[in-house]
Structures are given as structure tokens and as C-alpha cells.
Image (cartoon, rainbow, N blue to C red):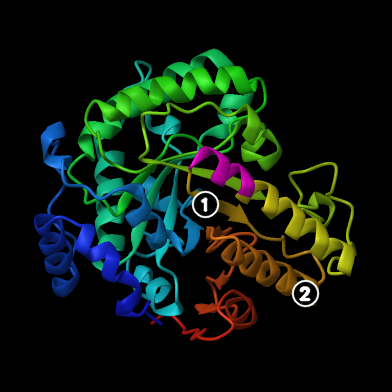
């Protein structure tokens, strides 16, 4: 399924002619474009306002966070050709989880080979008509080591932002996934502002995604401080409520690793979901910021029928409140795609896209 052209009318009108031609050419050839060269700020002068970019994130999926692809291994779980399957299934965007810190040397210089792999992956997604979120995803390291993390995050955006400034406006930057741990909301506001300044030096008009501290918990939105003058920001939050249901049986979480059989779906559960999203919507209206649900899902140990009901309910509730969403995730765990069988979880796709799911196997 592709989004009807009528839904993209206002978006395409707001895109610059040069950008539109670039996107059409890339998509028609089916091949990634040449590596992105660093741009001067003036070349983004005609990037569309964030309100024209936000609808492209209507239905997204997270992927590639822990894939051997980043090490250049030939037997990676993900293949670039699968972006076509993702687009055909009904998704409009991908949130690519970048764990950049392991690819830095002792002086925090990014590996050129890793940068080229990011470039190839991004262009492959663009060539299939997908919007792309490039998400710095080293939150676990930052919870363990606060000060070095802040330096690495700044070093990352200092190098990464100008290198990818030549990407079209359908490529968004997300400053950092789930800031938390030792970073208080005040500390996160400081680090986010620093990274935003570094990005804006080379990407003055690109849409940037920023979420609150407390691991992007919506209950910390009131502590998020953003520059009023920068309106090219989309605010994100993650939703795994209740954790006892969504994370039951997860081996990495001692609180829930031995807990299974937790149910979800009673009327009270649905009321909580609705109330929580209403809080987020009201915050977005009050602060004049578009909202994006960057992660949600339930681990495979949750009761099957209730897991499917949960992801469907969260997606529908997000849509009713005007939020685009990104399901966690394509492969590995919380997965929508079976790598060995080379096929989608058809029930999960129908829950996400009840009117038009068209699951296919990968050739």
C-alpha cells in the first residue's frame, strides 16, 4: 500500500523544485543516489516547514539498531532490498537506530567506513520513497558514563550533521534516543541545546526530533525546554505502558524477566491509554509543537492475542490524536518480521493497518 497521492498534495507543493526533482529521480531509478556532500546552510533555504514534513512520519518502523550490517558483515540480518518490502507493507518512514559510539576512535572521530554505510542505508531507504529518521541511539552508554557521553554526543553531531546536510528534507535527525539515567531533565536540556546548535550550523532548516528526559517518557514533557525561535522541531515520546505487560519475559530486565501471563485490554487499560495520549496532545497544542510517537510495542512473551490488540490500539489512539508513529521494531525482538521465515507477522500488520495490510514475504 502506498499513501494516496491526494494526501501528499500539500507536502509536494511546499517542497522546493530542486528537492522534488531529486526525490523523483532517485525513486525512478531504484538506485541509491551518490554520497551526500556537505552543504552550505543556504542550500536548505527552501526546505519545507516542519508541518509539511510531519505527515511523512505517519506510519514508521524502527530498525537496524544492533545489526551486524554496521560492521560490514556479509551475513547481516537486514538487507537493503528489504526497504522495498517495508514500503509495500504500508510504512511511510523508517527510524534508523544508529549506535555511533562504538565506531569512534579514542579521539571521538567517526569511522569513515561506518559513515559510508549510514549513507548507503539512508539512500537505499530514500530510493524506495521512505522518509528517514537518523536516530542517535547510544542511550545505554550514556546512562553508564555521563561526562564522556556528553562529549561523544557533541562530537557525533559535529561530524555527522555537515556530512549529511546534502540529504533531502525527508531525512530527519533525532538528537538522542531515550535520554535518562544520570541525566536530569535540566542536564538533558543543556546537552540537547548544545547538539541542536551544532546541527543548525550546517542544517538550518532540517526537521529535528527531540524528546523529553526520563527515557522519552511523556510525563517529563513539562520539563523539556526548546528554543522558541526554532520551529523546525518535532517532539517525540515513547510509550510502553504498562511495562509489566509490554516487557514481560524480557531477559535483560530483572524486574520483568520472570513475569509472564500479564494481560491487557480491559476497559480501564483503554481509558489509561486515551488519557495519556490526551495529555501529550494538549502539551503539543499548548507549545505549538508537532508530536511523534517514536516507539511502542510489546515483547513476544506477552499473550499473543493481547499483544496484537495492544499494538493496534496504540496505533489507532495515536492517529486519533494526530500523532505519527513508529513501531518497535522490524527484526530481532518485539519483531514484526520473521528473518528465518522471510515473512511479516501478518496479524501484527493487520493490527497496524486494518484496512490495507498487504504482508509479503521477502524474495
Quarter assignment of residue 308: bottom right
Asked whether the viewer can see residue 245, the reply is yes
User: Which residues fall within the magenta stretch?
Assistant: 282-288
Cα gap from disc 2 to disc 1, whole angstroms:
26 Å
Direction from residue 246 to residue 122 in the image, left or right: left
Q: Between residues 206 and 104, which one lies in front from this camera angle?
A: 206
Residue 198, how many percent across, how many down?
31, 23
Report the predominant secondary structure element of the magenta stretch. Answer: helix
Residue 260's place in the image compared with 6, above or below, is above
* Residue 61 or residue 78, whichever sits in front: 61
x 53%, y 13%: residue: 147
Residue drawn 83% across the image and 49% down it: 257
> Which element is circle 2 on?
helix
Q: Secondary structure at mark 1?
A: strand
Q: Is residue 158 placed above or below 67 in the rendered structure?
A: above
Q: Is residue 242 left or right of residue 281?
A: right
Give the residue displayed 55% in from the left and 45% down from the top: 284
First of labels 2, 1 by sequence position? 1
Percent of width and height locating residue 200: 28, 29
Q: Quadrant of the C terminus?
A: bottom left
| Quadrant in the rendering for residue 201 | top left
Residue 196 position (above or below residue 72) = above
The residue pinned by badge 1 equals 292
| Residue 287 among those drawn in magenta | yes
> According to the image, label 2 marks what residue?
304
Amino acid at each position: 500500500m502506498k499513501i494516496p497521492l491526494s494526501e501528499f498534495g500539500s507536502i509536494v507543493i511546499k517542497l522546493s523544485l530542486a528537492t522534488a526533482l531529486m526525490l523523483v529521480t532517485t525513486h525512478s531509478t531504484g538506485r541509491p543516489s551518490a554520497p551526500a556532500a556537505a552543504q552550505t546552510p543556504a542550500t536548505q533555504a527552501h526546505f519545507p516547514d516542519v508541518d509539511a514534513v510531519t505527515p511523512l512520519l505517519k506510519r514508521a518502523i524502527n530498525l537496524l539498531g544492533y545489526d551486524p550490517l554496521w560492521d560490514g558483515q556479509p551475513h547481516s540480518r537486514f538487507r537493503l532490498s528489504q526497504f522495498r518490502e517495508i514500503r509495500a507493507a504500508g510504512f511511510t518512514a523508517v527510524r534508523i537506530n544508529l549506535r555511533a559510539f562504538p565506531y569512534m576512535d579514542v579521539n571521538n572521530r567517526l569511522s569513515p567506513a561506518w559513515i559510508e554505510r549510514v549513507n548507503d542505508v539512508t539512500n537505499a531507504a530514500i530510493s524506495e520513497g521512505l522518509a528517514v529518521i537518523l536516530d542517535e541511539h547510544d542511550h545505554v552508554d550514556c546512562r553508564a558514563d555521563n561526562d564522556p557521553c556528553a562529549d561523544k554526543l557533541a562530537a557525533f553531531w559535529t561530524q555527522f550533521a555537515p556530512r549529511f546536510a546534502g540529504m533531502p528534507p525527508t531525512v530527519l535527525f533525532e538528537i538522542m534516543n531515550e535520554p535518562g539515567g544520570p541525566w536530569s531533565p535540566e542536564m538533558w536540556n543543556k546537552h540537547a541545546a548544545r547538539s541542536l546548535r551544532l546541527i543548525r550550523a550546517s542544517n538550518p532548516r532540517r526537521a529535528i526530533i527531540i524528546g523529553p528526559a526520563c527515557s522519552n517518557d511523556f510525563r517529563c514533557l513539562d520539563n523539556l525546554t526548546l528554543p522558541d525561535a526554532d520551529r523546525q522541531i518535532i517532539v517525540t515520546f515513547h510509550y510502553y505502558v504498562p511495562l509489566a505487560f509490554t516487557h514481560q519475559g524480557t531477559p535483560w530486565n530483572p524486574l520483568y524477566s520472570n513475569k509472564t501471563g500479564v494481560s491487557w485490554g480491559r476497559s480501564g487499560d483503554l481509558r489509561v491509554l486515551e488519557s495519556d495520549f490526551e495529555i501529550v496532545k494538549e502539551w503539543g497544542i499548548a507549545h505549538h509543537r508537532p508530536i511523534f510517537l517514536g516507539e511502542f510495542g510489546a515483547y513476544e512473551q506477552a499473550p499473543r492475542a493481547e499483544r496484537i490488540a495492544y499494538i493496534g490500539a496504540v496505533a489507532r489512539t495515536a492517529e486519533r490524536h494526530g500523532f505519527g508513529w513508529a513501531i518497535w521494531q522490524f527484526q530481532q525482538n518485539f519483531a514484526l518480521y520473521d528473518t528465518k521465515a522471510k515473512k511479516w507477522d501478518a496479524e501484527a500488520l493487520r493490527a497496524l493497518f486494518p484496512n490495507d495490510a498487504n504482508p509479503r514475504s521477502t524474495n
